[in-house]
Amino acid sequence: MFRIPLTAALLLVAASAARADDAAPYSAIDQAAAGIEDQVIAWRRDIHQHPELGNREFRTSGMVADHLRALGIEVREKVAHTGVVGVLKGGKPGKVVALRADMDALPVTEQTGLPFASKETAVYNGKETGVMHACGHDTHVAILMGVAEILAGMRDDLAGTVKFIFQPAEEGPPEDEDGGARMMVAEGALADPRPDAIFGLHVGPRDYKTIGYASGPLLSSSDRMRIHVVGKQTHGASPWRGIDPVVVAAQIIMGLQTIHSRQIDVREPHVISVGMVQGGVRFNIIPDDVELIGTVRTQNEAVRAEVHERIVRTAQKIAESAGATAEVTFSQPIPVTVNDPGLTEKMLPTLQRVAGKENVQPTATVMGYDDFSYFAQEVPGLFFFLGTRAPDMPASEAAPNHSPLFVVDESALVLGVRALANLTVDFLNGTSETERAAAN
């Protein structure tokens, strides 16, 4: 009969016990996540039915603050108007992890037909509009509320501190107001204690229960562009008596598109889009002025500066050629969202363990933005995408974020809860799964 020497046997028992100890927090997280899944979905539906625009998230932030306090978490409110910061101190000393969720909805009239669809309305930029969580921020809040409940239940075993950052106005604050991540940073959301890392996620119509990530740039920069074209008002029947800013504005719109196609290397991704054209009060009066409002997206700061310069030159020269003037301004700047390569490499095994290695895939940088970038400029950050498209829905039929038809498969939310909770525990433990396996 083959016999294992006593020393070897003891080592095997010790190794088995060590593996069991290693697995214990993950098992606890999975069990707690399964137990809280229905509550996460209920929170999400409640928030979805009562959406609020940026800097106006009064109900949502109150709900979040009440929940965190009930869990025994220290709470600071009214950060950047309506933001909430919770601090959970673990039972053991260690590092600090921050987790972020955005709370604001969009000026979109919902058309999903869901039983909990939003019927809310608001005034946005002087116009009455529907309000909808058309970008999934309702799910982000519900997911992080679930993570807070799980980690609060594990506080005695946590080796460090967790900061829960519930952020307003990620989509941008109202005109003439400050807000969002930049304002949260300025008001000390990352101070006392300062995080060693920050994690965040965003849902979207990617494949069901998949995770998309990038090491380095993930999301583009964004600038709000405003071009004020001034001509000379006249009768529509005699345009030669004035200077038509409508025609000039149209020429500027077309001219802007040549920046990408003819002026800058097309291998450098950038987008210039005009989303609003405002001018005139009557069909037969050529107005004095027209305003163009749009967005500029780039993935490289040098290209960003060059695009801005060329927009100004294009608008001003086209206007000058017609005897008009054009003033260009840029506002609400959002930097490129960059995942820290070292942090990404260290935490990738955690995401692969949670979602399955085959379901965690690198993704190309996208032209959308997220002001999570302001947090990631301050401390190492890792931001990733969570696929919430129903498994039986073809990708071609899935409505994108910001659509009035945007929906999520709520059964995917529990993966977001597990992912953020596991990232937190692994980071606070100080070693990745790969490092633990090598040590064993």
Image (cartoon, rainbow, N blue to C red):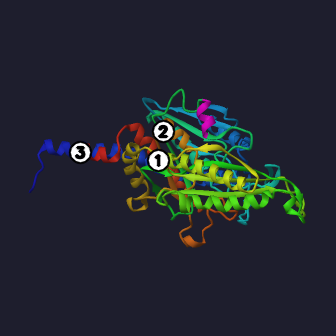
Horizontal and vertical percent position of residue 208: 51, 64
Which residue lies at the image location 71% right of the left edge and 52% below the top edge?
320
* Predominant SS along the magenta part: helix
Identity, as a three-letter code, of the amino acid under mark 2: Met
Callout 3: SS: helix
Seen in the image, is 438 located left or right of residue 419?
Answer: left
Q: Earlier in the sequence, mark 3 or mark 2?
A: 3
Report crowding for label 1: few under 14, some 14 to 19, many 20 or more residues within 10 A (C-alpha).
Answer: many
Callout 2: SS: loop
Front position among marks 3 and 1:
1
Tell me if I can see residue 28 in this picture. yes
Labels 1 & 2 near each other (Cβ < 8 A): yes
Q: Which residue is mark 2?
A: 154
Magenta residues? 181-187
Q: Quadrant of the N terminus?
A: bottom left
Q: Quadrant of the C terminus?
A: top left
Which disc, if any, is residue 13?
A: 3
Horizontal and vertical percent position of residue 107: 74, 54
Which residue lies at the image location 35% right of the left edge and 40% below the top edge?
431
Nearest the camera: 362 or 228?
Answer: 228
Q: How far is the residue under mark 3 from the one under mark 2? A: 26 Å
Tell me if I can see residue 117 in this picture. no
Q: Which residue is mark 1?
A: 29
